[in-house]
Image (cartoon, helix red, strand yellow):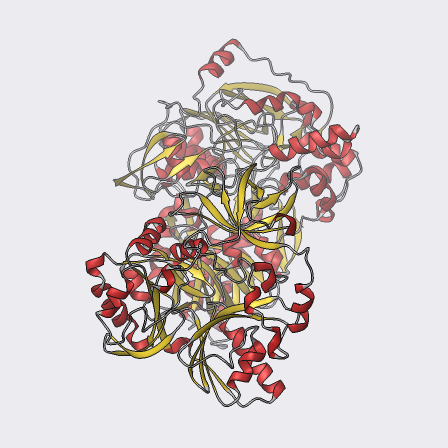
């Protein structure tokens, strides 16, 4: 338990002359540091030096190798400033190299808060620093650090609220400065990642020695195993171990990398083990359900048994200026050296509370660095540790019973001061060392979040300075460093035992003797480890200076935690929320251990009673798209779908269908229809076949128009309304015979309309039959001045204006295929809808394109169709209407026939007819070159919203922005001027009540 010493600062920082010079010449964020370079190739490195990759960082071209992370490539290129801190905008450099801290958060290809130290480089990616203005190297907001005395924890609760005007200003300013990164609101939404569901007899989380041993044991006993690991290769901490680190596994000695590689080969070659690499288990849910984030999407993995072998993460020490660039965790330094071949610096001061610092020192020596000293908080020299004796024999100064006091420097490390630990935790007999790197190891915190989520209980074990799991739920097992026993042999034995116990349901009597043997060996190994382990937590000396950071994420200092306790926040959960410790991107991985120790000391409460903050999923960040998952509605495709893909159409979702948005420029597609001929796939239209004696009566009752007097061979437009008279849908009704109608509906509403028909048929006991034939027909609309000449080549039906008039229907062969032809004009040009059996959809499409080749026929998509229909002022239900819109509001009075008897919605429509002050749907044309957006507001003279834009586009015919708007009745007159708020300002537009294109409808009737 570290001592927290309170009192006035004894070390006011006054830089020596050489400190000032070094600080002025320290490498900047954009300066190549010649002291750092790539090391010679290593057999365990992850980079492929034969494959070079280039990417951009803040406008600078960075050279890297395949397998590099953004962080390793930047460090190798001399970049030392990776980010600015959340609150004070202090310089932050690389720290953990494992994705557990906030120091490497960057914006990558427009995506904020990407952990650069674990995100691998890709050719051409664009990386930018964040939380700095104007840039990382010179951040003007760093002036906030000079006023940190005015920004203690909870400052926003204590002031700034009187007078009220001060709070309004302060709140706005704080909100602007808060947050990490910024979301690009103009970025296109990314496809939702794929989601799969999987089951495993045994699910193993973690690819280290314990996890691999568990997987092999369970698989050898007949279980199907899925092993999930968050690294690109298996091996755990052995991936970055050095040849000096000799480990004993199952009574055999290996160099650490060899041990990891040997187990990894066995795991990957086992036919009963599936490995999910580069995948993170972000949560443990009820019933042993694991949420797994993979490179290919989310996997819901349910295991009958779950073995948690997630290891432990190294935590930093707390000392003055422990956040300077150049202060790194010892495991982070080892990852840089051994996995990415990067030399961290020239000289290093090592400060440790455990054995890890010694192995890091050996790796740095082998990388060509100078170790100026190694300070160990433990009281005696570790004669039983081979790494310690090796370092001493190499002339490294080892200082037992010494702790870090402060780092020297302003932006990057230029030195460090260590001191002897006194009886009350103070430091004395200080020594100053010049260095450019400080390697620190404050011990390890088990990565036990999944065990907490599973419901495990924990107990403080002071021998290993950690909370250990003592009671696990049924079917959940723990193995390896997550149990706070950092011994490879123990990890292997724990893994093997967990694998046997998890697979015992498959082979209950298997390996009974072996299980007993493993248990005995495990007891002996744990006992041996406890006898030789010695961990002495470093003291927190508050008198050493004011800038001792506990939480790197939220810029919370040790004195802030003490202040929170003094103000009465003595419970770990309350103090967490007041101070915001553990609430940042690391979620306590870097700070919880030290936070709990300071709280325990300040409240004089044993660590066993302090408790811990609640662990909740996700363990690692997820995107909202990943959480939302894919649409659970199956997408429908028309019979011509493949032809659209072959034409490189840009596809879009519309009413549950995949439809071509465009084949190129929608404006050019619209012009082609106006000037020559175009075709569009409208097979998404709903199609109902209505037959029977009472079919005319049914349609008269559900539609507002009259259809009993519609002659066979004719087509009529109408709308369906609800009981209150508001528009449900619209469409056309073609009468094929006295008792036979062919009805089309909008794309999204055919199922609703079919049910609506069936409901009223049953209510009124009508003898009619309604069949949904949507999937049975392919429908192509051909339109334009040359539509008749094109279609005439494929049919013997007389298409002349006198023989095939507007709003008529005929049957006949088209391209030798039986078809129904409807002459309608949704896009405002003379044209026909060709309804043919779905099996012949592609044939009909190809035939029409071939026939129109001489006229430069073009397919057009939904976007061009919407431009064209808008010029003709044809509405789209649900876009130009809402749940309160009646036919009278959209200028469709003519479709309501009150003289035909009762019908659905008649009562509501009579009331709406007499309400003269209802909002109206009107057309508008912009007075300037602005094109509003769908959903923009119509505003009054004081810019208060009084209406909205339902549809807006750029007209290729007029060359102006135009569209539909819902406006108050007093503005719904021809020639009125309305004001539309778009792009931050109001713009004038002119109201029109007649179609923008061909208002007399001559083109439709040609």
Residue found at the very far left of the displayed protein: 854
Please, which residue is most extreme toward the front here?
802
Residue 620 left/right relative to 225: right
Image x and y of residue 116, in percent = 44, 39
Is residue 958 in sight in this rendering?
yes
Give whichever of 199, 147 is nearer the camera. 147
The spot of residue 927 in percent (x, y) is 49, 39
Q: Is residue 935 left or right of residue 669?
A: right
- Position of 219 with respect to 183 (left or right) is left
Q: Who's the residue at 68% across and 57% down the image?
A: 916
Q: Quadrant of the C terminus?
A: bottom left
**Quadrant in the rendering for residue 16:** top right
Is residue 208 visible from the viewing direction of this image?
no
421 sits to left or right of 634: right
Residue reaching furthest top? 17
25 shown above or below 115 = above
Q: Nearer the viewer, residue 44 or 167?
A: 167
Q: Quadrant of residue 163?
A: top right
In the foreground, 397 or 19? 19
What quarter of the picture does the N terminus occupy? top right
In the image, 391 versus 307, the foreground residue is: 307
**Residue 861, position in %: x, y?**
36, 58
Q: Position of residue 307 (x, y in %)?
A: 52, 62
């Amino acid at each position: 338990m570290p001592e927290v010493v309170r009192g006035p600062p004894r070390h006011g920082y006054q830089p020596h002359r050489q400190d000032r010079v070094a600080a002025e010449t320290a490498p900047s964020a954009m300066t190549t540091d010649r002291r750092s370079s790539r090391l010679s190739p290593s057999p365990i490195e992850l980079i492929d030096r034969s494959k070079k990759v280039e990417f951009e960082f803040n406008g600078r071209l960075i050279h890297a190798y395949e397998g590099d992370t953004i962080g390793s490539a930047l460090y190798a290129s001399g970049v030392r400033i990776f980010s600015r801190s959340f609150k004070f905008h202090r310089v932050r450099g690389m720290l953990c190299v494992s994705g557990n801290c906030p120091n490497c958060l960057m914006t990558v290809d427009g995506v904020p808060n990407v952990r650069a130290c674990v995100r691998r480089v890709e050719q051409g990616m664009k990386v930018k620093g964040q939380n700095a203005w104007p840039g990382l190297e010179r951040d003007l907001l760093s002036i906030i650090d000079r006023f940190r005395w005015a920004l203690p924890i909870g400052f926003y609760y204590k002031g700034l609220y009187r007078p009220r005007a001060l709070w309004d200003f302060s709140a706005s300013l704080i909100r602007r400065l808060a947050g990490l990164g910024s979301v690009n609101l103009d970025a296109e939404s990314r496809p939702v990642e794929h989601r799969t569901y999987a089951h495993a007899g045994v699910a193993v989380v973690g690819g280290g020695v314990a996890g691999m041993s568990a997987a092999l044991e369970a698989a050898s006993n007949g279980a199907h195993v899925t092993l999930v690991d968050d690294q690109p290769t298996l091996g755990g901490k052995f991936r970055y171990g050095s040849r000096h680190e000799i480990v004993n596994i199952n009574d055999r000695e290996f160099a650490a990398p060899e041990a990891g590689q040997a187990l990894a080969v066995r795991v990957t070659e086992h036919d009963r083990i599936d490995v999910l690499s580069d995948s993170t288990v972000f949560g443990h849910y009820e019933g042993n359900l694991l949420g797994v984030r993979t490179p290919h999407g989310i996997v819901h993995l349910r295991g009958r048994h779950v073995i948690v072998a997630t290891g432990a993460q190294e935590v930093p020490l707390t000392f003055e200026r422990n956040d300077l660039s150049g202060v790194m965790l010892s495991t982070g330094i080892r990852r840089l050296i051994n996995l990415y071949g990067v030399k961290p610096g020239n000289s290093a001061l090592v400060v440790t509370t455990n054995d890890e610092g010694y192995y890091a020192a050996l790796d740095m020596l082998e990388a060509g660095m100078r170790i100026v000293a190694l300070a160990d908080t433990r009281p005696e020299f570790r004669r039983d540790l081979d790494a310690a004796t090796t370092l001493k024999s190499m002339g490294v100064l080892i200082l037992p019973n010494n702790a870090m006091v402060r780092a020297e420097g302003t932006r990057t490390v230029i030195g460090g001061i260590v001191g002897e630990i006194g009886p009350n935790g103070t430091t004395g007999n200080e020594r100053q060392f010049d260095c450019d790197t400080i390697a620190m190891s404050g011990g390890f915190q088990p990565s036990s979040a999944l065990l907490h989520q599973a419901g495990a209980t924990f107990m403080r074990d002071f021998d290993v300075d950690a909370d250990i799991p003592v009671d696990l739920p049924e079917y959940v097992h723990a193995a390896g460093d997550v149990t706070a026993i950092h011994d490879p042999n123990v990890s292997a034995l724990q893994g093997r035992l967990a694998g046997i116990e998890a697979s015992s349901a498959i082979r209950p009597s298997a390996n009974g003797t072996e299980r007993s043997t493993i248990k005995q060996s495990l007891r002996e190994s744990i006992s041996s480890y406890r006898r030789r382990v010695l961990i002495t937590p470093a003291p927190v000396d508050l008198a050493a200076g004011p800038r001792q950071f506990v939480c790197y994420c939220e810029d919370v200092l040790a004195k802030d935690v003490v202040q929170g306790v003094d103000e009465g926040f003595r419970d770990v959960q309350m103090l967490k929320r007041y101070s915001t410790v553990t609430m940042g991107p690391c979620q306590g991985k870097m700070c919880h251990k030290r936070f709990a120790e300071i709280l325990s000391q300040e409240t004089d409460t044993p660590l066993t009673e302090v408790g811990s903050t609640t662990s909740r999923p996700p363990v690692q960040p997820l995107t909202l798209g990943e959480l939302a998952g894919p649409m659970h509605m199956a997408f429908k495709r028309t019979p011509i779908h493949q032809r659209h893909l072959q034409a490189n159409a840009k596809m879009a979702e519309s009413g549950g269908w995949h439809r071509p948005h465009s084949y190129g420029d929608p404006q050019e597609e619209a012009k082609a229809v106006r000037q020559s001929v175009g075709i569009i796939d409208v097979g998404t239209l709903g199609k109902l076949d209505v037959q029977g004696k009472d079919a005319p009566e049914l349609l008269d009752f559900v539609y507002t128009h009259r259809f009993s007097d519609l002659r066979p061979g004719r087509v009529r437009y109408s709308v369906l309304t609800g009981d209150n008279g508001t528009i449900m849908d619209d469409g056309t009704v073609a009468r094929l015979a006295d008792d036979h109608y062919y009805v089309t509906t909008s794309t999204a509403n055919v199922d609703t309309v079919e049910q609506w028909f069936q409901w009223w048929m049953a209510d009124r006991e009508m003898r009619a039959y309604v069949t949904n034939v949507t999937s049975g027909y392919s429908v192509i609309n051909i339109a334009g001045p040359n539509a008749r000449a094109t279609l005439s080549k494929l049919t013997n039906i007389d298409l002349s204006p006198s023989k095939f008039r507007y709003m008529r229907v005929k049957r006949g062969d088209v391209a030798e295929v039986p078809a129904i032809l409807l002459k309608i004009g949704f896009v405002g040009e003379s044209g026909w809808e060709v309804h043919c059996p779905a099996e012949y959809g592609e044939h009909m499409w190809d035939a029409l394109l071939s026939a129109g080749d001489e006229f430069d026929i073009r397919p057009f998509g939904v976007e061009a169709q919407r431009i064209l229909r808008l010029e003709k002022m044809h509405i789209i239900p649900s876009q130009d209407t809402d749940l309160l819109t009646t036919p009278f509001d959209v200028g469709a009075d003519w479709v309501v026939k009150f003289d035909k008897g009762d019908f659905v919605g008649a009562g509501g429509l009579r009331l709406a007819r007499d309400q003269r002050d209802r909002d109206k749907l009107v057309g508008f044309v912009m007075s300037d070159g602005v094109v509003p957006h769908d959903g923009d507001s119509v505003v009054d003279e004081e810019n208060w919203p009084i209406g909205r834009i339902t549809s807006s586009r750029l007209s290729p015919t007029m060359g102006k922005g135009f569209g539909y708007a819902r406006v108050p009745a007093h503005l719904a007159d021809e020639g009125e001027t309305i004001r539309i708020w778009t792009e931050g300002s109001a713009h004038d537009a002119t109201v029109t009540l007649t179609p923008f294109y061909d208002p007399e409808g001559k083109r439709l009737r040609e």
